[in-house]
Image (cartoon, rainbow, N blue to C red):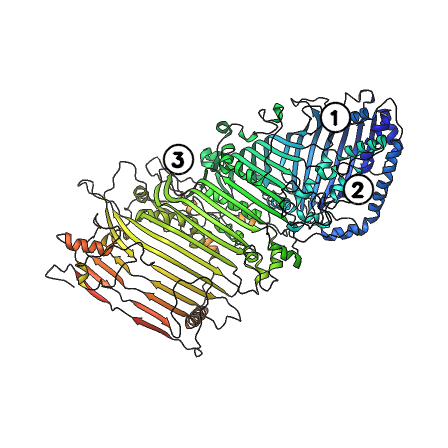
Amino acid sequence: MLESYVTPLLMSYVNKYIKNLKPTDLQLSLWGGDVVLSKLDLKLDVLEQELKLPFTFMSGHIHELRIHVPWTKLGSEPVVITINTMECILKLRDGAQDDHESGSSSTSRSVSDSSKAVAKPRRLQQAAPSDPDLPPGYVQSLIRRVVNNVNIVVNNLILKYVEDDIVLSVNITSAECYTVDDMWDRAFMDITAPELVLRKVINFADCTVCLDKRNASGKIEFYQDPLLYKCSFRTRLHFTYDNINSKIPSVIKIQTMVESLKLSITDQQLPMFIRILQLIIALYYGEIGGHKQGDGEEGTGHPLGFLSCDLTGLDVDMENQGTSQYPSTDLYMQSGSSDEADQGWVSWAWSFVPAIVGTEEKSEDDLYQQRETGGTPNSQQQHTHKDPIVSIGFYCTKASVTFKLTETQSESTYYSPQKVKSREVLCLEQQGITIEVLMMGEPFFNCQIGFVGCRALCLKSIMGVRDFEENMNRSEEDAVFFVCGDSLNSKGMTYLTNSLFDYRSPENNGVRAEFILDASNHKETYTEIAGMQRFGAFYMDYLYTMESSSGKGPQDFSAPSMEEVVPTIQETSVKRLVVGPLDVRLHSSAVHRILKMVTCAMDHEYEPYCKPQRATPEVISSLEEFIPTRLTCLTLLQVSVTFSMAEFNLLHTLMPVIMGRKAAQGPVNTPVFQQVRPLPSVQFQVERVNVEHSVPMYAPELVSAVSGLSQPSDNLLHHCYAHVYLKVFGFQAGMTCHDSTGSFLPLIPIIPSFSTALYGKLIQMPSYWSKRSSVPITEFIFELPHFTVQATRAQTLLLEVICQSWTHSMINGNPVTLSESLLSEVYKARGVKSLGPSPTLEGSVQNLELKFCSRATMKCASGTVGAVKVCARTPGVCSCGMKEKLVPLIQGPSDTKELHISRWLNEIRKPESLLAPDLLAFSVLVPQQGDDCRNSGAVLLVSVQGIAVNVDPVFCTWLLYQPHRGSSRQQQQVCNPLSFPLAKRREDEVSIGSTPLAKQPSNQASDYASSPVKTKTVTESRPLSVPMKVMLDTAPAESWTTSDERMKELIAQVWDAVKRLTLQLEVQSCCVFLPNDSLPSPSTIICGDIPGTVRSWYHNQASMPGTLVVCLPQISVLSAGHKYMEPIQELPFVVSRPILEEGKFSHYSKTVTSAALSMLPLKLTTQCF
């Protein structure tokens, strides 16, 4: 009878996970075709042992379980298992809980183990009867067809996770899993040649995710808005087998598709949501302990996970290897020692692959095969199996994340409960989201994430400022402040490439898919160019590989023999991130919303997840061969950041919270938002940014081991640091303006394009190195080949106005004025020429290199500046057709040794060569405060080459520029229809004593940071008013006694530092030219050569303006007893100090060249002094 084969199979699953079941009643009900079981309790200990999660089950119930078996049509209709209302509550497992459970639940676990031991003979006994009319091959084929077509329906699935004050609940109204055909339609299918494929579909309906906060008693006072509300999605499963008798598929693809995903996060949910993300990351990296192993079983692996060779299947008991062709779920999970959980979440997740694809089914078939044939499978196949390839994907067409701020509102009556009202402030929208995971056993894991397009926009109001309310009539372009990538209309459906939802994929065309499982080939195939072509906005590729030091590839991890030496496992982790064309617009509305989200995210008291371990001496010796690291590479392409002038400023309520302080309490006012157009802005553009960040994979264990060594090797010390490489290409900055049409004017360059590089390293866990004064804590190297800044005086004044608009509420509170003439001068319309064109000041720095090193006892730095040039560009007069003039102002280095003598005018001097010494070279050492460095002082070594300065009248013209007198406007005013419109506020809006808006109560702990201050505006006829915030924060004036005491203390500290200072100063002569008229550089002279310009005017011009030449002396200062050192020293450096008398201050100074005055031109017969 078929019942004798199918019934034990179904009973084994039900009886294994459900308590208090009578097998006889279950068996009789199954034979009737339908089983209905109500109010069932799950065996929590069995679930924990099977799942081996880092969580523990607090409760688990099934309200109703239905099983329908069509005995008469078992070969053509599926078995249907229906679960109505299943609820499970989990919490994070900790060490104390493990100890408690090991004692309290030992009885239940032992009973469960004994019941499992008894269940196996029972299953053998129940399966003993055989029907001669049913051949063994037919039985196996029928059971395989039954299991492959089982339909599972779950109605009202409730999962809850609790931790601290977090309550995360997932409610799925309906979920159904069934078998489909090659068109993904419901069908009764079987695995047949030559395709050897099984397809399934899981439909999820109305998935709701809630995240709430509970109080100390465990109750939820206010229910927050759901994170996800009634979202439906579908999942496709595709299993590929090597042959028809394979029990485990060779390729497993599980991919989910969501058309629309709308997430909602409130200010209270944000820190809890971040906590959940940190939990997931900690689980992946193995920072949280997993399931506790059986009693009496101790971990034998190394504390460092990368040295452990307890891979899947290596430590399996040899006696149990002959029971099946592939290890069962229990045996598979016992392959590692008790510290298997230290290997991270990948090991845990991978252990479920046999259970997901039907390991128990295989065990049952083997059971019948053994009974029929009387033999056992070949044990050699246990070693030759290959881990299946698992591909998991998540795809979403459109998604949005909306951030909300909550407020509590009380009802009219006293006893009425408070209600929570949320207000949308920020929305992040994405298009074409892809998350793909590919793994094959533990040795290979790859995760790719990509976005086609992404943008962020402001919603409604923030901190009482109604800047984007519906009645403001703001355009959508004004609300969007972050745009990245393309849209689906232009990009297409590239995010679904090679997925089960792509009709062009190999699986949907009857072809086996090929996977790249080699690190080198993977890097060559999945480049940043390929990622940007597929997505466009964001692409991340994370690759983790594990290889044996014996030379075996990632797929060859067979169990070593007893004589073989256990190889060292080499792990590599590389994460590459690419961000496509990016446009960020930081105006007042965007900045305040972002900072508000930051303050909300910081409002928590959660402890970090961490589980450091110490390494043994045997492990330390193995570290010399290979130390695994995590490498992160970030690439930014075509980045544009626009920083606009603040239309309102409430940063004084947000920055103290971000900096770890509390904001000042007191009544505050709310500003009334008024749009400013045109809005001046500063724009930064970067062609490409490359960032590489490398950290040791197991920093706590590595640092604790290496810091205990007396003389660690350079290789070990190198890997105890976090290394950062930053390269910036094509960085430039300029000024623009957001006009009334919503577009930006062409960029006015302020900083021309340049490139730079930065390298830094930071010791991991500095507390371990506090007593190792010879080990550097931090090191930085900065290189800047060329840097230029150019601006008119009007542009610098406007830059100052933009900066003050963001800082005035935290400095003096004075409202920022904006002149119409200043805007007209900076943003000149095309074709409009100004009456008096202002000169442009241009400064450049070449070959700048800075180094910094920090130790426990000192900090030191050194650097060089190759050359500095400053010149002024004066626009030519259009009527005479003159070109712009170049007037050099500062030149360094310059040969100023004989400039005080008149004969240098008649000499022919070559221009400064590229091999000239650096203008500035210095090294500085500052000891840290401590008992061991109390008697040591700072060291300063400086060398400055000659500098030529031309105090040209054009510089005074640039410096004394003032915008034309005219109407000025306040920062908070709007525009009228004129060119630069103005609008004045009513008198009651600018008064200091205006009535503040009523502050609404809030249940947010950090709500004191969301109480805005009403910014004030003034008119020209009224004096400047001081905002209320400044008046409230003004502290009483300190007494003269306190000020004198502080001044005396400061002078004493400075004098004490100067007495212990070791100084070596070399300053070459500085020559200053003061002409009474402008001296532009001729076209035949190298740009910026001041002596050459003066000489050219002296010889070639008919009338040279009178020039006063001041040559300052060459100065050399050397501390007494100090031996001369090169100004550039390798960091860190040590200076031998002479023994001086206590309190004695002694420096030796020498003046090589005296100061001299001379007048030019010498051709004139009369000179005026």
Q: Which mark is residue 320?
A: 2
Query: Residue 958 location in percent, x, y?
Result: 27, 51
Where 229 falls versus 217 (above or below)?
above
Residue farthest left in this picture: 1165
Instruction: First in sequence, mark 1 or 3: give its number.
Output: 1
On the picture, is 509 further left or further right than 638?
right
Tell me which amino acid carries mark 1.
Answer: Asn
Q: Residues within 10 Å of mark 3 (few under 14, many from 20)?
A: few
Nearer to us of marks 1 and 3 is 1
Circles 3 and 2 in contact, beta carbons < 8 Å: no
Query: Which element is circle 1 on?
Result: loop
Where residue 994 appears, x then y in whole percent? 46, 47
Q: Quadrant of residue 123?
A: top right
Q: Within 10 Å of the Cα at label 1, are there few (<14), some (14-19), or many (20+) other Cα atoms?
A: many
Q: Which residue is mark 1?
A: 149
Which residue, given by chain and number where applicable, does mark 3 sit on?
Answer: 743
